[in-house]
Image (spheres, helix red, strand yellow):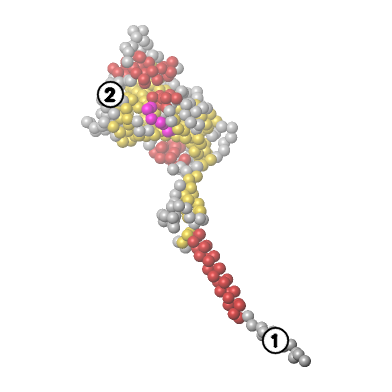
Amino acid sequence: MLVSLQLGSLIAPAYACGCGAMVVDRNSRVAVDRETSAVGWDGSTEQIVMQLSVRGNAPDAAWIMPVPHRATVELGDAALFSELRAITAPVHEERHYFWPREEDWPFGGSGTSSADGAAAPAAAAPVEVVGRERLGPFDVARLAATDPKALEGWLEENGFELPDRLATALTPYVEQKWEYVAVRLAPEKRGGTLNGTLDPLRLRFASDRLVYPMRLSELAATPQSLDLYVLAEHRMEPRGAIGGRPPKVAYAGRVDPAKEPYEALAAVTGGRPVFVTAIDQYFPSPERIDGDHELRATAEDTPYRRVVHRDTLLTWGGMPAWLLTLLGGAAAVVVALLLVVRGRRRRPVPPPPPVFTPPPLR
């Protein structure tokens, strides 16, 4: 299983990141500050638990998400994300340094420091509505389309204004005969705007590979950061960078959710132990994203955990160790000199040698 955390601050009529795209009225603006998704795969079935944190002046919006097969949709458990953050959190360790740095006394500071469109053609294939339901604050439509223009037309008829660029970006998914989940987002209070963290949604669909849809992120106007948390039998890795910088491992280790306990995680995994792999990736130029993330097992299940160090000036009794060492050294030198002087004063003074008197001359 895989979990993703994607952060962004793009405010625009269409926002794209991670596994979907946000669409609002052209006169409105919306920002997705945080997208958190938990994705599980058992070899034949994939599930995604998705949660959005949004802000803006839009009275409503739509989240469009491509899926490889027909999906079922239900509300998810937000506690899952808290547990996953706790599991993959870095270890904080303190380490000391001896000599003062420029932020320490006597140079400055207090002695410590820390390390951070066109009309649809007449022959276009129709859109099939395979399901529609109300889940809490969400109006969820599940669609099947074999033509991007037909999909665009259906969305517009139902209040979702689809930008031309997004319709073009959806073309590869249509060619692969993927389906879509279109979710209408609306504030809980009538007359309000979309702001805050929304309830999570849980999607399930058949899939013969572990895939995280990323292609729509090419529409983003700002750099994108992606954190992937993979829960499987073995340590996992992406097959490629898909247009971003090389992925980096932030955590890898085996977790038994029944022993901790992590109840939400156990509900998703069926209570079985899993190997957790956390992967960070940065996309400085989102327009270069050229595909979806596929993940595979690594050659070895090597554990790893990120360590965050806090560098602190070494002290003894509240005093800098280097200062006490210098003072102690100086005191030792003074004592040694005093001992030498004292020793010389106590040493007996030998009598002067006798004066030689030559004999008188005759």
Q: Residue furthest right?
A: 362
- Mark identifier at residue 355: 1
At numbered mark 1, what does the secondary structure look like: helix, strand or loop? Answer: loop
Give the residue type at disc 1: Val
**Label 2 environment density (alpha carbons within 10 Å; few <14, some 14–19, many ≥20):** few
Measured along the vertical axis of the image, is residue 5 above or below residue 291?
below
Residue at 26% x, 25% y: name it: 27
Q: Is residue 354 left or right of residue 275?
A: right
Specify start and end residues of the magenta stretch as a single range: 220-226
Give the residue type at disc 2: Arg
Look at the numbered discs 2 and 1 and tell me whether their residues touch, using CB distance below 8 Å. no
Residue at 32% x, 19% y: name it: 155
Residue at 51% x, 27% y: name it: 240
In x, y percent, where is residue 321?
50, 60
| Residue located beneath label 2 in the image | 26
**Label 1 environment density (alpha carbons within 10 Å; few <14, some 14–19, many ≥20):** few
Which quadrant of the view contains residue 17? top left
- Mark identifier at residue 165: none
In x, y percent, where is residue 22?
34, 26
Query: In which quadrant of the rendered image does the C terminus lie?
Result: bottom right
Can I make out residue 265 in this image?
Answer: yes
Compare residues 267 and 223 and report the one nearer the observer.
223
Q: In whole angstroms, how far apart are the C-alphas of marks 2 and 1?
A: 119 Å
Whether the magenta-drawn stretch holds residue 27 is answered as no
Measured along the vertical axis of the image, is residue 58 above or below residue 129?
below
Q: Is residue 125 left or right of residue 46?
A: left
Q: Residue furthest top?
A: 123
Measured along the vertical axis of the image, is residue 319 above or below residue 361?
above
